[in-house]
Every structure is written in C-alpha cells, then in structure tokens.
Amino acid sequence: MEGSWWSTGVVSHILVALFGMGSWVSVNSLWVELPVVVNVLPEGWNLPAYLSVLIAFGNLGPVAVTVIHHFAPGRLNEQLVIHIIQVLAIVASAFLAIFWSKVVSVAGSNHSLPYLLLTFVLAFVCCTSNVTFLPFMFRFPPEYIRTFFVGQGFSALFPCVVALGQGVGKLECLNSTSGNGTQEPHYLKENFPAENFFWFLFVMLVFSGLSFLALTFRMPTQPAAEDAKNEASASVQEEVEERHPLQNGGAVASDDQVEVEKSKPTETFWTARNIYLLVLLGISNALTNGVLPSVQSFSCLPYGTMTFHLSVVLGNIANPLACFIAMFVLCRSTLILGGLSAVGGVFAAYLLALAALSPCPPLLGNTAGIFLVVFSWIVFTGMFSYLKVDIGSLLHEGGHTALLWCGVSIQAGSLIGALSMFPLVSIYHVFQRSHDCMDDCPV
C-alpha cells in the first residue's frame, strides 16, 4: 500500500483533524443544546450553573494525568488512556441520547440525574483530552499540531451548525392576548428533538475514535538506530515544512523515540520564553473558553437573536479558519505574539463592556452596533485561535513535556476563566439580560 492514497500526508492531516475534533465536541454540544433541554429537565435555567460545576469537577482527570507524569515519568501509556476516554465518551453519548430526559426523585424533589452524571463523564473526558491528546501529537511532525487545532475548531463549529439547523432559540413576537398593545415571545418548536442531536454527537465521537485508531496503525515502529539520521535531517525538514506546510515534513516518531524523549530532563524547558508563552496561552484560553462565552448572550441578545446567531456561527467559523492560516503563516516573535494578544484583548474588553451595559448597550437599534458586535466576536475568536495554534506549534519544538504543559495551561486557563465568571453571572447577577419582544430601553 506504500505510495497509495492511504499513505499520503493529506490523509494523515484529515485523520488528525477528526481526532482533534473529538477533544471538546462533547462539552460544546452540551452548551449549544441547553436552550432545548432546559425546557424539559426539572432544573430549568439553573442547568447552566450545574453544567459549569460539573465541567470544573471534570478537571480531576487532567490533575491525575499531570500528577502521574510528575511522580512516574514515562509510566503512563497515553495511547491506551486516549483509547479508554474515547470509548467512555462514545458510550456516554449513546446513553445520553437514550436517557437524557429521565428524571429521578432525590430527597423528595425531581432531578435529571442521568443527564447530570453523563454530563460529568463527558466533561471528564474533554478536560482529560487536553493533557493526553496534545502530548500524543509530539509523535507527529510540527505541522500536524496546527491541523489538530483546526479539528478542535470544528468541535465548536459542527455542533453549532447542527443546532442552528435544529432551530434552537427561534421565536416570534406576537401581540399579547391581554389586548394592552404589548408583544409576547412565542418560541418555535425545534425541527428535531434533543435525542437526535445527541445521536449526532455520538456519530462525531465515533468518527474521532476511528480516526485515532487509524492514526495508531499508520505510526511506524522505527528502530532507535535511525534517531541520529532523523536528527541530522531536522533542519532540512523544518525548511520543507515552511515551504509545504500540508506535506509531512518529517517522520512520525516511534514509541521508542517518544519514551526516550519522556525520560529526558525537563529543567531546560523552564526558560523565560516558554513560561511567557504558557502564561499567554493560559490568559487567551481563559478569555476564549471561560470569560467571554459566559457573557456572549448578554453582549449580543440586546441587538436581537439574529445578531446572537451570527456572532456564534461566524465566530466558530473564524476559529478553524485562523488555525488554517497558522498552517501557512507561523509567527516566532514573542513581541508580535504579545501584540496580537493585546489587540484581541481590546476586542474582548469591548465585548465585556457591552455585556456589562446590557440590556441597553450603545448603538442599540443601529446597524453599526450590530456590525461592531459581530465583527468584534469574529476578530476576538480568530485572533486568540491563531495565538493558541502558534504557541502550540512553538511548544511542539520543546518536546513531549512542552506539549503536556501546553495542555495543562489551556485547561488551567479555561478553568480559571469559567470559575471567575460563574459567581458574577449566576450568583451576583452582575449582567442583566434583555427580555424578548420587550423594549428594555425606552427613550
């Protein structure tokens, strides 16, 4: 089969993208389907708070993996762990499609216990993927780490597109039956039920699992004697990679080579540059995965449901698009990376200001206001998505340990961002939502 289409680099890139898609597709799917399930489950609109807490507890997985790497370096079989968590996610998604609406009486009150337990399992898998999937990608040449992040972008885009096709959040403003001249929201029935959506999640996870299985069969078992030859050609491979980023610029590392890399001392990794990159990565993920998603509805809904949908869809398109651009344009300057994060931070600050001023943000009822909020979400998401891929590619050069800490930084930043916003949004209600079909800002 050597030389056939199956052994080409394009196939490897497709498999890596599908593998990366499975990393966070479960949690992203749970979030976009919330408007449907809250109308059925007894927790109602308290369900997002439950979901945030369960995702936080899902970080027990990354903590366990990091502790094992620290106290027993080289002992953890990442490939086996990935197989286990992927099977766990597939089984949990199938059970979710079947049992999501089941209610159990606990202490005299009804709770959606099956949904909550399966949500925890899926959150545990997603959180653990950051510290297992990324280190596994060390086996592949640097260009594949960018393809992996493209796949992660698809993990947000695909569920969002399906949810829009489902008709999530669609409403009509009808005249009130009381005859006082006001309007009331009338929420339209979805085009297909939640269980169909969860079966779609099941299919995506199956594709991701099969793609990883195919990747493991494509990895050669290279003898250690070839290491010197590979190192001698490293500079040539890097040059080829920059000219042809979609081609496999280097050989896939064998298990023996990975184990040798794991056993190397890690002191040299903790340079000022790498620490700076990890901090930048943590801050960017705190904003993109925790802070801004918590207030997206507050920043967009005052301008209308169409503005909200455009921001979600176009922002999720900007994510994989920025990752794709990073495959061809890779920035190595820490100064420029800091500048890009500052520009993204300006748009993040604008969106936070809009959320804080909800339900009466500036330029309300003006086309310019709608354009600015949608444009800000696109640039904010695209800028930090590019930053994540760029930093991940640079850390790939630091070896297996660097990619492990890359995953830890992503997960820690996301957790801190989510936990910092939870009390502001759900407990102290700092942000006020607009009411559908009502004028919350009379002149």
Image (cartoon, rainbow, N blue to C red):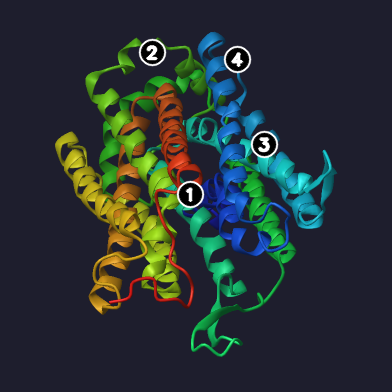
Name the residue: 43% across, 33% down.
Answer: 416
Query: How far separated are the C-alphas under marks 4 and 1?
Result: 27 Å
Measure how far apart labels 2 and 1 are at the Cα level: 28 Å
The kind of residue on which mark 3 rests is Ile
The disc at residue 266 is 2
Any part of residue 39 in sight: yes
Q: Which residue is mark 4?
A: 75
Query: In the rendered structure, which amino acid carries the disc numbered 4?
Result: Arg
**Residue drawn at (49%, 60%) of the image:** 157
- Residue 64: percent from left, percent from top: 59, 21
Going by the image, does 270 lie left or right of 45? left
Could you classify mark 3 by the number of other residues whose Cα lies within 10 Å: few (under 14), some (14-19), or many (20 or more)? many
Q: Front-most of 395 and 38?
A: 38
Question: Which residue is tagged 1?
Answer: 152
Asked which quadrant contains residue 219, the reply is top right
Q: Secondary structure at mark 3?
A: helix
| Residue type marked 2 | Thr
Badge 2: few (under 14), some or many (20 or more) residues near its Cα, within 10 Å?
some
Q: Is residue 425 left or right of residue 390?
A: right
For label 1, count other residues whose C-alpha is less than 10 Å away and answer few (under 14), some (14-19) or many (20+). Answer: many
Identify the residue position indicated by label 3 in the image: 85
Residue at point 16% right, 41% down?
Answer: 336
Residue 219 visible in rendering = no
Residue 418 % position (x, y) = 46, 40
